[in-house]
Image (cartoon, rainbow, N blue to C red):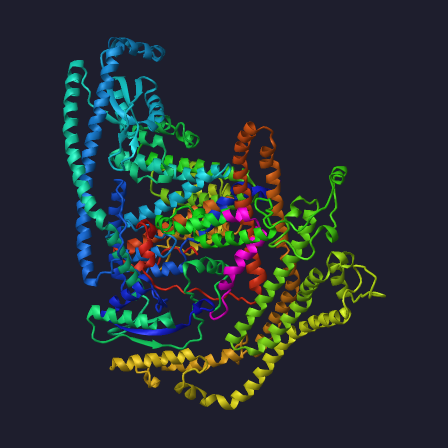
Amino acid sequence: MGSLFRSEEMRLCQIFLQTEAAYACVSELGELGLVQFKDLNENVNAFQRTYVSQIRRCEEMERKLRYTEKEILRDKMRIPDILDNPKAPAPKEMNDLEVEFEKMDNELRQVNTNNEALKQNHLELRELKEVLDGTQTYFAVYGQDIQHMMNEETQGHEEAIIGTRSQQTAALGFYVGTIPREKVPVFERVMRFVTHGTVFLRIEEIAKTFEDPVTGDEMHKCMFLVFYQGEQLRNKVKKVCEGMKGTIYPVPESTQERQEMLHGVKTRIVDLENVLAQSNEHRKRVLSKAQKEIRAWTIKVEKIKAIYHTMNMFKVHLNSLTAECWFPVKAIDDIRRALSIGEKISGSTIPSVIQPMVTDENPPTYYNCNKFVKGFQNIVHSYGVSTYGEVNPAPYTVITFPFLFAVMFGDAGHGFIMFLFGLFMIIKEKSIGSKKLTNEIANTFFGGRYIIMMMGLFSIYTGVIYNDAFSRSFNIFGTHWYPNLTDSELRSSENIQLNPMFAHKNSSAYLIGVDPIWQSAKNKILFLNSLKMKMAIILGVIHMLFGVCLSVFNHLHFRSYIDIFVKFIPELLFLGCLFGYLVAMIFYKWIMFDASRASCAPALLIHYINMFMFKYTSPINGELCDPNLTFYKGQDTTQYIMFFLAILSIPVLLIAKPVYVVVTRRSRAKKSDSYHPSDPLIFNEVPPEDSEITLQVYQNINQGFQDDGHDSFGNGHPKEGPTNGTAVAVAHDQQAPAQSHGGGGHGHGDEETSEMIIHQVIETIEFCLGCISHTASYLRLWALSLAHAQLSEVLWHMVLSLGLTVAGRYVGGVVTFVIFFFWANLTVAILLLMEGLSAFLHTLRLHWVEFQSKFYEGEGYAFEPFTFRRILRMQSLEEVTS
Amino acid sequence: MIPEITFNIDHGYLEGLLRGFKGGILKQADYLNLIQCETLDDLKLHLQSTDYGNFLANEPSPLTVSVIDDKLREKLVVEIEHMRIHALQPLAGFLDYIKYSYMIDNVILLITGTLHGRPIHELLPKCHPLGTFDQLAAINLANTSMMLYNAVLVDTPLAPYIKDCISAEDLDEMNVEIIRNTLYKSYLEDFYNFCKKQGGATADVMCEALAFDADRRSFIITINSFGTELSKEDRIKLYPRCGNLYPAGLKLLGDCDDFDQVRAVAEYYPQYKELFDNSGSNAGEKTLEDKFFESEVHLMKKAFMQQFQFGVFYAYVRLKEQEIRNIIWIAECVAQRHRAKIDSYIPIF
């Protein structure tokens, strides 16, 4: 659990792997998923790397699998999920897989080609049947008149051209065929242009649909009948048909022959269908064999590919590979175990070696979160991944986020619905999670299920405090107001003012939250405004103070103790004296002024403004009551102190840090003149002393090596190690950052100094102005809460209460029933969804800007370990390509 | 109203999209990697790491150059079609104009194909997908330009372009060339006027680009006509009259009899003088064609300097065509193990 507050301790190590063991070791590390490899061959082309041929083989296998998968899905067969996690096969087995895929692929392709040919044949026969049918009916209807019609049709043109009409009747022929429906208009048009309208064209749609033999899509076709005369026209018509993808079928002229042909075609169709069914059966068999295995195959191939990709990032030596990787220090035992399993599998006799490296590179940030914290961590990370080692705001966000949300969303009823929704998703977590939602919005909601549940839970709480559920109040504990009014008094006036002096039990208050009597009061909003506004300021200042306090842990961790004095304390003073004091005044007013002294209650706003203008009017004698008079003894002195403390902390913030850095740098420069030359050799012997864990790792590893016995890179004599040179140089550097945090090396001092001063000025201005604007920004808590309450009240009064006030028991019931539908829908759509989203956004802002700006840098990068988990989650191979 | 203000209402999305596509055009570094490839599979592997992504993933090894060509072209077509579908007028019209040039190419391809007695269904798949239209299928009927007009082009946008060369003569190779060039000439002039009408930056950029194209055609026609039966009068009719050469330069070109005279004409135009000066067919020298391509690439890159205009769409198509030519050139060199001239591709960025 300790890991949540800061990133896990990360370490950069070199791993030396024997070439024969590398594959198995990387495979094991992938299963473990806790190691992030660095690409050591960045300037080598993708196709010039060591294991490129293996990757290419994997891609070839992928292609075959993709083809098979597509075929399986085309037949609407499901690809079953597998529960176990097949390990990456050994490199030798890759050949077997390849052979198997090759066989499957060939078989499938062959079946498909056969099938396609059969289907094409079938399609043609069916078309022929339709065409024959069509022609038959056509001739049955118009048969006798064809010649006659032809004459009429062409008469118009022919007479103009002065044709020889006697010849026409002689060479009348016809073509029958089919054409895709979408081509019909073009076909007609082209036919007309080409023949100048001298052919008779008849097109009829075929009611039946056909199946495209290749794609399996539905096709609509039309049959056409073209009557032409003469050889030349025949050629033209034929060419047009060919060009338009039409199919011409040989249809005999006489009815008798057509009838016979039709008969023949029908029997052939039946035969062909039998063959087709058998061929389909065969295809199904082939596919179903693949169907069972394909998931496992896919995972295996993807794993092999991932492993080789990773191995491509390693440096290659004669018979060993060198990898550089980041991993959490805690996981070192797991990693070592994984490596030794890998060695055992591959039968390698020489063990792999882990060698820690010292580097000035920033380690990646890694939190080992559970699914509950994950959502909150994501909220933090979408602002910026935390710098390695800095305080992680996520654990605090777990509470503050839902709480600030609930302050704005304060309604027990709405909160309850939200809570149920979140709870529902959590209970159904497994079944929803395994379904793999495709809808992005649904996915977002599902990802934030724990946040939603927490927000609902906290909304119930604030709803109870506001005494607000669907804009109604509950009088559970009995109101503590008791207006002793007579009937006549009630009847005589519309508005009655209750004086808290006499109408309230002043000894106690309503047990939890706001007294329900305010629900019916006319000045409810005035009352709640005052309450919520002050509350917003109080919560905001506490939230910010908390943020400032968290920065101490950063300073402690990074060992910049000076920052505690020049940064943290002035910041705390500035914020505390100005706004902390305001909060104190609010509490003072709440506690010290009751109904009896209501008229003396100070106007805080005026007092606060006067604090900056040094204007104080002290009471002449104690009896006088005026909100503008000073309200406690020594108020002016206190306020003077507060004000000047705050003002004085500004120059401290501005100047102290740069001065300190410049001074230390100068003194160090003086020292290093004499000190430097002998420096590296000393560091060489001693591991960096500023982190104990490093020491532990060294010791751990030392032990490990000693156990292993034969270790060429023995850590005891680092001078022999291959990384000796770099380790020495870097070790020296690591000492430096603690002292010159924010500064830099020794060389270019002037530029860095001016840069640092500008940086400091900006930071100071940002903080001081930020405090003021951020405090004001927290007023959104009040504004949104008010808006939410008002909106839900409007909905109640304008919609549901209409139904409730309609007269009549029976009619009213029905009306209410109908109106409730509208009310419930509007409540969910507007109040829960829209208002919920807006409150969520504002909470997000309050955390990112107002809270995190006080301590959070967010300039790290996330730890992205090499893992097979993504491969397991992958639904289909298409995801690889897209 | 200044067109720049309202441009984004209709065309902002597509321009943004296009500038995104432009980012995917291969850089010099990519080419340097490509020419190191030993096999086509290496080429594929490298292209995978560019914007082309997995466009070859489903192709079985061994790859052939023609497969790569098809896939490259397919990718461009998908992009252009996507933009055409989402385009509003007048951008839609503009994109159509770009497609017309492919239509002309297809028509000519099919006619030459049928002249050589190839069946139409064998030729149709060879057509550029950007320039296909339904009537193309009837092209095997056209044995005269009259028939070509009547049966094929009459209700296509190309119909107005052919009206200058309708005749009842049988088509032969000479005729086809003349038809191609006449179509192209009318097309270029029409496109030129269309762009001029758009005004603003579009006119600035496009008129320059089209003028360059027109001039290039004029030069090439002249050079290719030496030693053929084409008469000077006919030749002069084929010159597009919208370039920088029009009118004086075209007149001079019309009188040319050999290459040196053409070079002399180019002397008058500094931008072309340079191209002729540095070109040659000797080893180590670039051909005139390559010089023209280089110059075109330069011009097209310049088109991206201005915003709120259609020129970028044209420029993108042109650059992409050049890129495809480059990749194919490299692929051919790799496939034929003829690496000597592998680096005579034309780098774009």
**In the image, is A272 to the left or to the right of A198?**
left
Residue B44 occupies quadrant: bottom left
Q: Quadrant of residue A108?
A: top left
Q: Is residue B63 left or right of B238 when viewed as pictured?
A: left
Mark yes or no: residue B259 visible: no
Task: Pick out the residue farthest to the right.
Answer: A620
* Residue in the foreground of this view, choosing between B173 and A613: A613
Q: Please give the name of the residue rendered at 22% of the width and 51% of the height, measured from the top-left corner.
A: A293
- Point out residue A530 in the picture as x, y percentages from the top left corner: 68, 54
Nearest the eye: A341 or A61? A341
Instruction: Compare residues A470 and A479 and report the one nearer the observer.
Output: A479
Residue A694 position within the rendered picture, expressed as x and y whole percent measured from the top left: 40, 78
Place of residue B144 in the rendered image (x, y in percent of width and height, measured from the top left): 33, 28
Q: Point out the stretch of residues depicted in magenta.
A: A388-416
- Looking at the image, can residue A23 be seen? yes
The x and y percentages for residue A504 are 70, 52
Is residue A484 positioned above or below A622 on the image? above
